[in-house]
Image (spheres, helix red, strand yellow):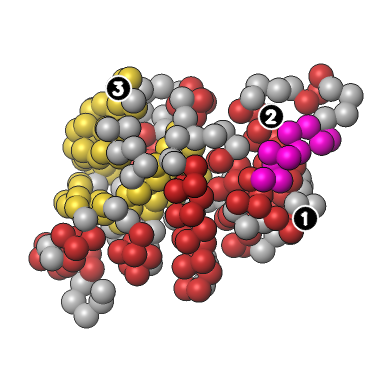
Amino acid sequence: MLLEAKGISKSFGGLSAVSEVDLTIGQEELVSIIGPNGAGKSTLFNLITGHIRPDKGTVTYKGEDITGRKPYDISRLGIGRSFQKLNIFPRLTAFQNVQAALFSAQKINRKLFADASRMLGDEAEEILESVGLGGRSDTLGGLLAHGDQKRLEIGIALALNPELLLLDEPTQGMSPGETVETTELIRGLVRARHISLAFVEHDMSVVFGISDRINVLHQGMLIFSGKPEEVRANDEVQRIYLGKGEK
Ligand code: ADP
Ligand code: MG
C-alpha cells in the first residue's frame, strides 16, 4: 500500500467529523471519495495531509508513520493536493503560479537571482500544457475562467512532483461537459506520471467511470469501499447515498 490510514478520527466539539476511518490507496490506484455534504471528505484529506491532526488513528505513507506531521513535510514526502476552495495567486500569471510552486518544491529562493523570470520555464510550460493551460501561460490567475483556475491548482500541485495526488472536488462549479473533460485530463496525467490519485467528486457518472475503487463516507464513517460494480450492488449505499431513481 502506498498510503494507509487506520482508525483515523477527528471531532470538532461534539461533532464527529471523521470516525474510525480506514482508507488505503495503492500504487497507481485511482480512488474516489463520495458522500453527501458534511460527510467528512475534506476533513479526511486534511487529516492525511497534516492540515488537521487526528484525535486517533495513524497515517502511514510508504511504510512510514506520518501521523501528525506538518503539511510542508508531508508534501515534501510526495503527497500533493488541491483544496476545495481555490488556492492560487490571482495576481501572478498562470506560468508564474506554477513556477512559484516549482521554486518552492526545489527550495529555490528567487530573490537570490537577478533574473529568475524564465527559471524552470520549460518545466512550468510542460505542466501547464498537461493541465490544458498551454495557451494561458501569460494570463493572470485571477482572470482565468473558473475551470482554468481549477486546472491551474492541479498544475500547482504537480509542481511538487507528487507520487500521490489528492484532489478535493477538482470539477466543482464546472458544467457536466467540462467535468467529463477535466476528469479525462486528470486520469490521463495520473496514468502518464504513474502516480496514485484520490479525489472527491459529486458527478456519479465520472465517479463510476474512472474509479478503480470507490469509498463512501457517511456521517464521518466509511460505510463502503469497493469497485464500482460492488458499490452499485450494495443496497446500503444505494439507499443512503445514491438514492432511488438516481444512478
Ligand atoms: P465534506 O467535505 O464531506 O462536505 P467536511 O469534512 O468539510 O465535509 O465536514 C465534515 C463535518 O465537520 C461538517 O459537519 C463540518 O461542518 C464539520 N467541520 C469541518 N471542518 C470544521 C472545522 N474546522 N471546525 C468545526 N467543524 C468543522
Ligand atoms: Mg468538502
Q: Position of residue 170 (x, y in %)?
A: 48, 55
What amino acid is labelled 3 in the image?
Gly
Q: Position of residue 20 (x, y in %)?
A: 19, 37
Instruction: Using the image, tell me which numbered label, if any, was put on residue 69.
Output: none
Residue shown at the point (30%, 60%) measured from the top left? 36
Residue shown at the point (60%, 46%) measured from the top left? 155
What amino acid is labelled 2 in the image?
Phe
Return the residue at label 2.
103
Q: Which residues are magenta?
A: 117-126
Q: Is residue 50 above or below residue 208?
A: above
Instruction: Using the image, tell me which numbered label, if any, was put on residue 139.
Output: 1
Residue lying farthest right? 114
Q: Is residue 77 visible?
A: yes
Return the residue at label 3.
63
Tell me the mark number nearer the camera, choosing from 3 and 1: 3
Residue shown at the point (23%, 28%) measured from the top left? 57
Q: Is residue 5 left or right of residue 124?
A: left
What amino acid is labelled 1 in the image?
Thr
Residue shown at the point (21%, 72%) measured from the top left? 243
Task: Give the quarter of the figure containing the C terminus.
Answer: bottom left
